[in-house]
Structure formats: C-alpha cells, structure tokens
Amino acid sequence: MEKEKLDRINFLARKAKETELTPEEKEEQGMLRGEYLAEIRMSFGTMLDHTVIQRPDGSKQPLHKSDKAKH
C-alpha cells in the first residue's frame, strides 16, 4: 500500500480519537481499511503458499490450503 494511503489511515484514526469523523471521512476510512486488510491477507496467503514443513527425517512437505478455510 502506498505511503500516502497509510498516512491517511493513520490521520483518520487519530482524528477519530479526538473528534467525530464526517460521514465522508468514515466512508473513506472504511474503504482504506478494507484495501489495507485485503493487501495483508494476500501477502500472508503468498507467504503461506511458500511455507514448507520439514519433518524429523529431513523430508519437506508443502503447506496445503485447507478447503475449510474458504467459507
């Protein structure tokens, strides 16, 4: 995520602690947070796709996605 968007998320969070956000700011904050979380989830998923389990015998097994995780 671009630094400007992260700065804006942080600005809106600080402002929300001090005063009430306008409806437009609340909507913007929600959209930015959603975008941020989507990027975090994608990054974490990519990291898990490249994760392997090394067994005591030295063999390596890729970590497979669970069908249960997709609701």
Image: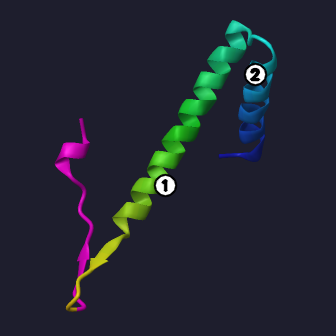
Residue drawn 20% across and 91% down? 57
The residue mark sitting in front, 1 or 2, is 2
Asked whether, in this view, residue 12 is left or right of residue 39, the answer is right
Task: Give amino acid for label 2.
Answer: Lys
Asked whether, in this view, residue 20 is left or right of residue 41, the answer is right
Residue drawn 74% across and 20% down? 16
Q: Is residue 16 magenta?
A: no
Q: Which residues are magenta?
A: 58-71
**Tag of residue 5:** none
**Residue under circle 2?**
17
Asked whether, in this view, residue 2 is left or right of residue 53, the answer is right
Q: Is residue 60 magenta?
A: yes
Task: Give amino acid for label 1.
Answer: Ser
**Crowdedness near tag 1: few (<14), some (14–19) or many (≥20) residues, C-alpha within 10 Å:** few
Expressed as whole percent of the image width and height from the top left, the position of residue 7 reads: 78, 38
**Residue under circle 1?**
43
Task: Identify which residue, 55 or 49, lies in the foreground.
Answer: 55
The quadrant where residue 32 appears: top right
Asked whether, in this view, residue 34 is left or right of residue 5, the answer is left
Spatial CA distance of label 1 from label 2 is 29 Å
Residue drawn 27% across and 67% down? 63
The quadrant where residue 65 appears: bottom left
**Disc 1 element:** helix
